[in-house]
Amino acid sequence: MLNSLRAGIGLQAIFFILFFGTLLPRMNNVIGAIICLTIGLLSLFIGIKSFLHQKDAVLPTLIIGTSVIIIAFTIFAYFMGEGGYPPLILQ
């Protein structure tokens, strides 16, 4: 189970490197959205799987919470229009 937690943390680290390293704006919008959703959904699945199999549920809960935030950010940033502009994924 520790390896799956490491994988979940690693996926989230990759997302934060892409985000704070300003690599996401340089990517194609569709590819960026797919990558962010994939990272978020995989880490959510890993977090839920770890939560069900561990007695101490603090770290899996943090992984689940962070992955939900990543998914919510992706939906907000790529799939919602703003101020009369179409969603970023359609541009």
Image (cartoon, rainbow, N blue to C red):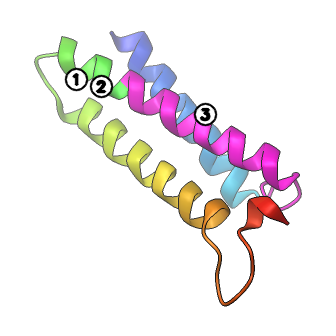
Q: Quadrant of residue 58?
A: top left
In what element is the residue under mark 1?
A: helix
Q: Identify whether 34 is placed above or below 23.
A: above
- Assess whether residue 12 is covered by the magenta stretch: no
Give the residue number, with chain letter if any, for mark 3: 38
Q: Are marks 2 and 3 in contact (CB under 8 Å)?
A: no
- What's the residue at 46%, 21% (across, down)? 6
The amino acid type of the residue labelled 3 equals: Thr
* Residue 91 shown left or right of residue 11 in the figure: right
* Residue 23 shown left or right of residue 38 in the figure: right
- What's the residue at 40%, 22% (across, down)? 46
As drawn, the label of residue 48 is 2
The amino acid type of the residue labelled 1 equals: Phe
User: Which of pointers 3 and 1 indicates the residue nearer the eye?
Assistant: 3
Q: Which residues are magenta?
A: 22-46
**Residue situated in front as seen by the camera: 35 or 30:** 30
As drawn, the label of residue 28 is none
